[in-house]
Image (cartoon, coloured by chain):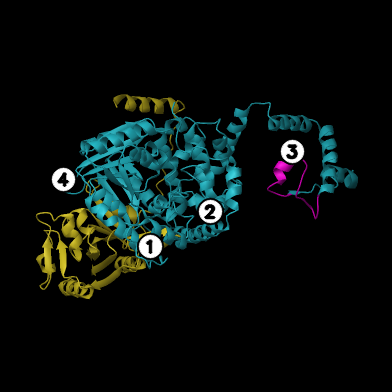
Amino acid sequence: MADARIEILGRIRRSLVDRPAAPAVPRDYDVTRPVDDLAALFAERVADYRAKVSQVTAKKLPAAIEAALRARDAGSVVVPADLPASWCVNGFDWQIDDPPLGVEALDEVHGVLTGCAVAIAETGTIVLDAGPTQGRRALTLVPDYHLCVVRAKQIVGTVPEALAALDPVRPLTFISGPSATSDIELNRVEGVHGPRNLEVLLVT
Amino acid sequence: MARNPVTWLGSPTFPRAAAEALRDPQLRRNLRHATHTIRNKRANAVAELPDWERLRLAGEAIKNDVLFHLDTYLEKLEAAVTARGGVVHWARDAAEANAIVLRLTREAGAREVVKVKSMATAEIGLNEALEAAGVGVVETDLAELIVQLGHDRPSHILVPAIHRNRAEIREIFAREVPGAPPDLTDAPAALAEVAREHLRRKFLSATVAISGANFAVADTGSVVVLESEGNGRMCLTLPQTLITVMGLEKVLPTWRDLEVFLQLLPRSSTAERMNPYTSIWTGVTPGDGPQAFHLVLLDNGRTATLADPVGRAALRCIRCSACLNVCPVYERTGGAAYGSVYPGPIGAILTPLLAEAPEDKHVASLPYASSLCGACFEVCPVRIDIPSVLVHLRAEVVAAKGNRTPEAVGMAALAWIFGSSRRYEAAQKAGALARYLGHDGTISRLPWPGSKWTVSRDAPAPAKESFRAWWRRTRG
């Protein structure tokens, strides 16, 4: 094992006898771009992936959660342990992931409700970092319906802005629309292994 | 040294395989439809970013920096992954990588593994190696599954089953998937549903997963996988043990560099603003995801490629497959004709570079699988000048043949003719006679050895009078 490492590093050094100088990386690409209304752009781009998006006020959020779950007939919903109590409205079977639920249990619930870490307007992306209101990665993966609360102040404009706001060593998941595939004739079809339904409640 | 398995053993040379592929009208229709769909979508996705060209330049520069300091960045990556609870392994070639993965799988007590689509593991023939040792392999990417169930070979980097249309996929699923509904239609959504049902149990019960990697960040130890279906997330999250096989050149220096590649890759490959899912993990996170993580760093011809000052540009490749989708040759012959895990323009350079088998006729034919039109260079997100590398590799093929071949003798004769204006003009006069072979200004059949050229193309008939003769006659 150790020999493979030494040998490969030795091969690299021999292959680079010319050791060309690498010119400085030109960083003149756009880190940010002017956008009038980040929330509107985010909503439009998420909807482009055929995810459902609704804009709500903070006050009306619990009612919007209830309406979304009712519309999907989602009776049992898994949630991370630190979700705000006001999100867990009456009338549903809330399954709290503490102690952690097994995959079979996650497979049986109707949906999952979480917040997010960051959202990217330009690409319509939600980023989860397993931080507050998000739980571990399996929660948002196994259930077939993901209801995600995004606060307007969590939205950044571009991919570079999002990466700068994230902690690299946390487990990160970038979600852009529901699970999809382009594998049949290179056309995008929604719904394979990940949640086939993504719904976003955008709190403005 | 063991023969590098990038190519499929016994593959015919490209011209022979291409002639065969061109006789299949269904294949040509499927490929034309798919490549034209994605071409237009990509153009739109790219046009949306005003700084696209600047991103390409940054992507090229970052990758060059990686290659020129590959030893430094790999050592940093190893240290960062190890510090976060991962285990790093080094593999000189395919056999060594396969042996490491097999040993780790056995140590984890698994008799079956789930797999995320990965070019590196296809390159080393990992599935075959594991199966030969009695370990079952379940490909979970939809297109890989279509290829696996169809007992077929992949023909595209991103969409290995691009040569199959929906009706053919329906046939394969109806025949091969136990429990596929008898009234299965060829609607893509219905076909995706079959894959979901088929793989669901496998995901929920798997203990070992194997993946590739799109990127790994040296300064943080973070590994990145981009995907669409969620099969990647399933493999990267649910099993207890994760084994990632990554080509050495996939390392990036810093976290910030991802801001370039997470824009370049999705728009170039699936032509989307962003692919549905991107997973990034760093070592092991207690209570979340696999509790054992192994990263296998694969050489398999990469360090040898690095030694070629022209060819090393191919190591910048991020496997987006944009060059396949715009290539007029690929569009007509399909991927199978290349006889390699890496088809298309990038395959025509990467295969000979990795394979290290200049004496192999099939490998030597690949740099000629191009009209040098340059479309591949224009779309390449990391600006690999594929036509220049093709010409460089053609020169190597010719040099390897020595100076006694008909081509070398012919070129030497040409050099002699070009060396004197008298000889040059005499040759022009003689050549002008060839116009009698032509019809309407083109020659479609030359006598041997010219027949080797005209078998697949027309030659323009030479003019009756050369420019020099005309000049002398009218201005002299």
Q: Position of residue A27 (x, y in %)?
A: 39, 47
Task: Report the predominant secondary structure element of the magenta stretch.
Answer: loop
The quarter in which the N terminus of chain A is drawn is top left
- Name the amino acid type tagged 4: Pro
Q: Circle 1 sits on which residue?
A: B191
- Name the amino acid type tagged 1: Leu
Colour of chain A in the image: yellow
Q: Circle 4 sits on which residue?
A: B286
On whether residue B137 falls in the magenta region, the answer is no
Please indicate whether residue B66 sits to the left or right of residue B136 in the image: right
Mark 2 vs mark 3, CA separation in Å? 32 Å
Q: Circle 3 sits on which residue?
A: B449
Question: Please, what secondary structure does the residue beneath circle 4 have?
Answer: loop
Q: Which mark is residue B326?
A: 2
Q: Position of residue B160 (x, y in %)?
A: 44, 51
**Which chain is indicated by disc 4?**
B
**B222, B360: nearer the viewer:** B360
Question: Please, what secondary structure does the residue beneath circle 3 have?
Answer: loop
Marks 2 & 1, CB-CB < 8 Å contact: no
- Name the amino acid type tagged 2: Val
The quarter in which the C terminus of chain A is drawn is bottom left
- Highlighted magenta segment, given as a residue range: B438-458
Q: Which chain is cyan?
A: B
Nearer the N terminus, badge 4 or badge 1? 1
